[in-house]
Amino acid sequence: VGTHDAKIVPGAFSHIGDNGTRESSLTKGEQTRRRILEKAAVLFNQRGFEGCAMSELMEATGLEKGGIYKHFASKEELALEAFRFAADSALEARVGDLEAIDGALPKLRTIIERFLTEPSPIPGGCPLLNAAVDTDDGNPALRKLARASFVEWRRRIAAIVEQGIASGELRHTADPVQVADAMIASIEGGLVLSRILGNRSPLEHARAPLESMLNQLDSSPRDKHPARNRSAAR
Amino acid sequence: VGTHDAKIVPGAFSHIGDNGTRESSLTKGEQTRRRILEKAAVLFNQRGFEGCAMSELMEATGLEKGGIYKHFASKEELALEAFRFAADSALEARVGDLEAIDGALPKLRTIIERFLTEPSPIPGGCPLLNAAVDTDDGNPALRKLARASFVEWRRRIAAIVEQGIASGELRHTADPVQVADAMIASIEGGLVLSRILGNRSPLEHARAPLESMLNQLDSSPRDKHPARNRSAAR
Amino acid sequence: VGTHDAKIVPGAFSHIGDNGTRESSLTKGEQTRRRILEKAAVLFNQRGFEGCAMSELMEATGLEKGGIYKHFASKEELALEAFRFAADSALEARVGDLEAIDGALPKLRTIIERFLTEPSPIPGGCPLLNAAVDTDDGNPALRKLARASFVEWRRRIAAIVEQGIASGELRHTADPVQVADAMIASIEGGLVLSRILGNRSPLEHARAPLESMLNQLDSSPRDKHPARNRSAAR
Amino acid sequence: VGTHDAKIVPGAFSHIGDNGTRESSLTKGEQTRRRILEKAAVLFNQRGFEGCAMSELMEATGLEKGGIYKHFASKEELALEAFRFAADSALEARVGDLEAIDGALPKLRTIIERFLTEPSPIPGGCPLLNAAVDTDDGNPALRKLARASFVEWRRRIAAIVEQGIASGELRHTADPVQVADAMIASIEGGLVLSRILGNRSPLEHARAPLESMLNQLDSSPRDKHPARNRSAAR
DNA sequence: ACAGTCGGGACACCCCGTTTGT
DNA sequence: ACAAACGGGGTGTCCCGACTGT
């Protein structure tokens, strides 16, 4: 992330015909490589690095062993690129395309709603979360990538907050990075608990402290009427 | 968890000599079994189920394979019991021994502080978090255990909230389960982010929304002046 | 070699029954290990290190891979011990049991005759020769072992020469190491050529320069009549 | 060998510019083929057939796999031609260009000196020796080639002896083939031992029996004074 | 009776030599 | 001449059953 090109978002080209568009100028090898990444991103996200065998990737991609190793020197290299792919996809799906939304608070609330309502673009849950736990020991390369992914995510949210402060929409006392961290933490935590429990209620419950926090950021003079906190009331 | 006996908390017997106390009445086999669990809890928590080989357990325990398999029928059974052991340890360390603290809010704040200041009693981070991600696919037995562990944790926090409501300390509009979920989510999320980033700042930042929420729960009439939210201010 | 124990000579125990002799006191694991070495010595000697797959060893020993790797940490370790086994066997077969023979020249001629008439105790030819070529590139461990084996071989022949000089049987101008090297070189060279050609004639022909040399070493006053060199005459 | 054309000796064209000489009339494909052979001859000679992977040849030649397979149907065919190339090179370097030297004994001694002083024209040692050991099992095609190479080598030396006998320089009792075999055996054996030991002393020591033999072949009436055999004396 | 040795399959990742489209 | 894909086989390691000697 961070340096990633938004155009790499997966699926964006999956519906391409054989017309002469720039996208279809991918060589056959690049198409195969991409297909492998798409499958691998899902499998690694679901099963973890150790839990996912190359044989499963062979089956998923329809390629033989040699076909895969032609494009990736090792399982680890494949896992790294697959994570990058997955993380980019997730990032775009959740904090992308916000330009059309006016105002910092609506933008932040949109991000939250996306997590609450839309499933992960990559099956298996948040790639960042999975990578963080999977790479807990060892694998510094993947860890570095996960860190970069998180930092980019935080940067984007913090940027929204900064713009809100600059425009006067948010109180100038707000700390953009802290807001970003708090948002991401609540959301990721809610995702974990929902995964454990098997239903989305913990994720819903995680909305409450976020709303409290956002309300306090709001610089508008109107009172925070209790009715507002429906979600925290019984 | 849930059905576990709190006396199994590890370390409780670690200082036992060979005198005839009740604890030392463990048979030699039971001591060995316990020693295996103590080591396995750490290793599985650090490396995950697939990532941890029996050979590592052999090395860690100093036993041969046959010695381990005498006590546990399979790697999975060992992992299950090791998780139970780890989860119990973590639970007690974080939400145990709160009777001496007066009031619901102080109790809740104590829990939060413990996560912020004390390291995980089991190296490798929160066992619940690790198990949740590790068992994402398959392994329904471990998943069930993780769920039970989470439910117990949530139950304990919700009980504190309920007592606070009953005593009038907290608003009667508070939803105990929601508060518990929100707290746990923020904390777990903060733990994940701190693990990725390699420092505790995200965990610190996760305190803000929790404080906002706790303040709103407070039924005391004093105004919630903004100055209170030091942590959310610059 | 050099430090080897003559009791390790293979085949020495191959005819052992189930009586309670000292040799049968080998544990089951040690017996298996030995069986593996006996087979591996032959296969590696015939096919070389790279040319011999573990699957062939599995077939030859009747063991599964796990069974073999129980006794040897790696293919390389197995190859090393197998070479040591083969080299010791060959050494004993060719330069062992010479005490009963009187005189340095008869001893040296016996060694030569053994090479000319007896087949290699380890099928596949002289292990020293094979290892020398097989380990031409890399594998310093095997190379070191081969060197030790050669040095021991040379040492034994040189010792015979030295004794011959001391007893007055050989001229005091003889250089024991040079004699040893020349003998071994002629023999090994003859072995190679015979292997290429598929018949023993080059080995027979290699006898001539050796006889010339031995005759010159002889300190006895009788003339070296040309008729002696039957092998160099037509 | 044997049927090969001496003009294929490698290096003969290595200094060729792009002028219109007959040699540069090689098509581009033939030049590539030759470049592959030059590299392959070295690699196979150093690592053996099984020990040398096509990927190494790719790296050495700078070609892709397909590029190599355009010129050789299989790895084995390539190895065969590479050996022929290497063997021819070695033969010419050691027993070629002897016409300028007068007399059979000087010619034979020149051959010996070349082995003792000049390094192998193909890195990795004597191709004949390497092939003989490498192809010990199976590979009848290469074995046949090695045999032909040896036979040619022996034939050339025997021819020198025959001419010496015909001219009266050598005793008529000499057996040309035996002399050739003995010479080659001593030299090859010395090469092997020097390779094992890592220094040239065994090769030097192998000179002694050869000198003894050559002296006995000499038909000149002068006595074989002991001082001649400096190398065999201390 | 039991700790521990031994052996068994299965499978991991990786790389090989090869063929096919381009 | 290359890029891509193909199978098959390389070594090494896994988890675990079963036997063994104390």
Image: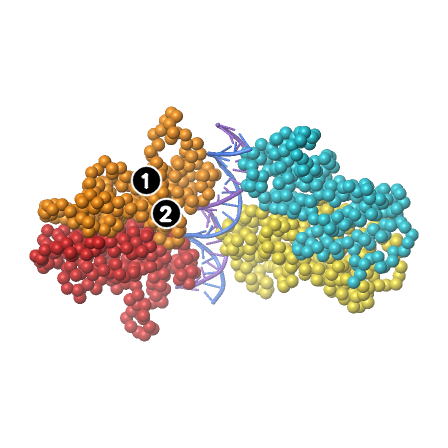
Chain colours: A orange, B red, C yellow, D cyan, E purple, F blue
Say what amino acid the circle numbered 2 marks.
Answer: Leu
Measured from the top left, where is residue A42 in percent x and y?
Answer: 35, 41
Measured from the top left, where is residue D6 in percent x and y?
Answer: 73, 36
Say whether residue D148 is visible.
Answer: yes
Position of residue A180 in the picture relative to residue A228 (left or right): right
Q: Residues within 10 Å of mark 1 (few under 14, many from 20)?
A: many
Q: Which residue is at a point 86% across and 63% down the rendered structure image?
A: C220
Mark 1 or 2 closer to N-term? 1
Q: Is residue F7 above or below residue B132?
A: above
Judging depth in this view, the residue of B167 and B1 nearest the camera is B167
Q: Chain of mark 1?
A: A
Judging depth in this view, the residue of B160 and C87 nearest the camera is B160
Badge number at residue A145: 2
Judging depth in this view, the residue of A7 and A200 nearest the camera is A7
Position of residue B56 in the picture relative to residue D60 (left or right): left
Q: Which residue is at a point 33% across and 57% down the rendered structure image?
A: B124
Badge number at residue A89: 1
Position of residue C20 in the picture relative to residue C204 (left or right): left
